[in-house]
Image: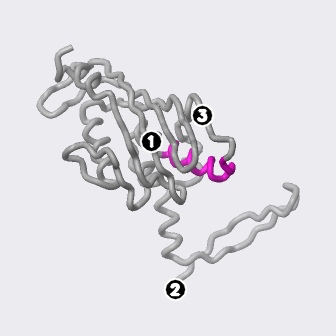
């Protein structure tokens, strides 16, 4: 199997005693690593206004689950599919799949593209993040302006502001299952598709 060598710093105690080592990584493993986001991208993740975590969780488990949730929240905030791919398990299952949406990772990717066609400046504020066991509950506030098209309706710049709540089951650092509910009535009213 071909190998690719990467350089890494090794810390053996105080910061002053650093050494450098070359580590061999098989090419298929390296390719899998490249699909994930670089560490610097994680520094640009959205943060929750409030985080509530079960104190009995091991810190590593808590942090891994929060990271997966923040990556997925950043996907909804930016529309950048790399964040969804980094957050979602390969066998991701949407447990409240809307009619017409594809199951698995393709579903949220298509949903984001569709919504951003109508609301190009869509943002998702992560208001609350609650971690308990292997579950993370997130509460979002979506907002933007309807300046694009929703099906056959052209937007006129209407303000969009609605909430959503998701429950994620996290396994092996990825979101494996999602149960979600959005305030679609508020969204449809703001789009002018349903009478107020």
Indicate the position of residue 154 as horizontal and vertical percent values. Answer: 16, 26
Magenta span contains residue 62: yes
Which of disc 3 and disc 2 is earlier in sequence?
Answer: 2
The C terminus appears in which quarter of the rendering?
Answer: top left
Residue 7 horizontal side relative to residue 33, left or right: right
Which of disc 1 and disc 2 is earlier in sequence?
Answer: 2
Residue 1, which numbered label?
Answer: 2
Assess disc 2: are there few (<14), some (14-19) or many (≥20) residues with their C-alpha within 10 Å of its C-alpha. few
Which span of residues is magenta-colored? Answer: 57-71
Mark 1–mark 3 Cα distance, whole angstroms, equals 14 Å
The residue shown at (59%, 75%) is 25
Q: Mark 2 or mark 3, which is nearer to you?
A: 3
To which residue does mark 1 refer? 167
Residue 134 horizontal side relative to residue 113, left or right: right
Indicate the position of residue 110 as horizontal and vertical percent values. Answer: 27, 47
* Pick the front one: 108 or 93: 93
Indicate the position of residue 51 as horizontal and vertical percent values. Answer: 60, 34
Magenta span contains residue 31: no
Residue farthest top in this picture: 196
Indicate the position of residue 103 as horizontal and vertical percent values. Answer: 28, 54
Which of disc 3 and disc 1 is earlier in sequence?
Answer: 3
Mark 2–mark 1 Cα distance, whole angstroms, equals 40 Å
* Pick the front one: 102 or 43: 102
Q: Mark 2 or mark 1, which is nearer to you?
A: 1
The residue shown at (53%, 31%) is 128
Residue 164 horizontal side relative to residue 38, left or right: left
The residue shown at (66%, 48%) is 57
Confirm or deny contact between disc 1 and disc 3 (CB under 8 A).
no
Residue 51, which numbered label?
Answer: 3
Determine the secondary structure under disc 2: loop
């Amino acid at each position: 199997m071909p190998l690719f060598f990467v350089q890494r710093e090794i810390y053996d105690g105080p910061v002053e005693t650093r050494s450098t080592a070359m580590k061999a990584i098989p090419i298929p493993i390296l390719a899998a690593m490249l699909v994930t986001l670089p560490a610097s991208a994680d520094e640009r993740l959205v943060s929750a206004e409030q985080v509530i975590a079960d104190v009995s969780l091991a810190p590593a488990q808590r942090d891994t689950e929060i990271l997966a949730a923040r990556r997925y929240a950043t996907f909804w905030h930016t529309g950048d599919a790399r964040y969804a791919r980094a957050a979602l398990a390969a066998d991701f299952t949407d447990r409240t799949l809307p009619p017409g949406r594809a199951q698995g990772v393709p579903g949220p990717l298509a949903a984001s593209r569709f919504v951003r066609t109508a609301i190009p400046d869509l943002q998702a504020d992560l208001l609350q993040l609650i971690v308990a066991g292997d579950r993370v509950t997130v509460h979002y506030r979506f907002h933007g302006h309807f300046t694009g098209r929703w099906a056959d309706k052209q937007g006129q710049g209407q303000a969009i502001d609605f909430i959503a709540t998701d429950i994620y089951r996290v396994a092996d650092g990825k979101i494996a299952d999602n149960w979600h509910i959005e305030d679609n009535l508020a969204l449809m009213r703001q789009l002018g598709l349903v009478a107020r």
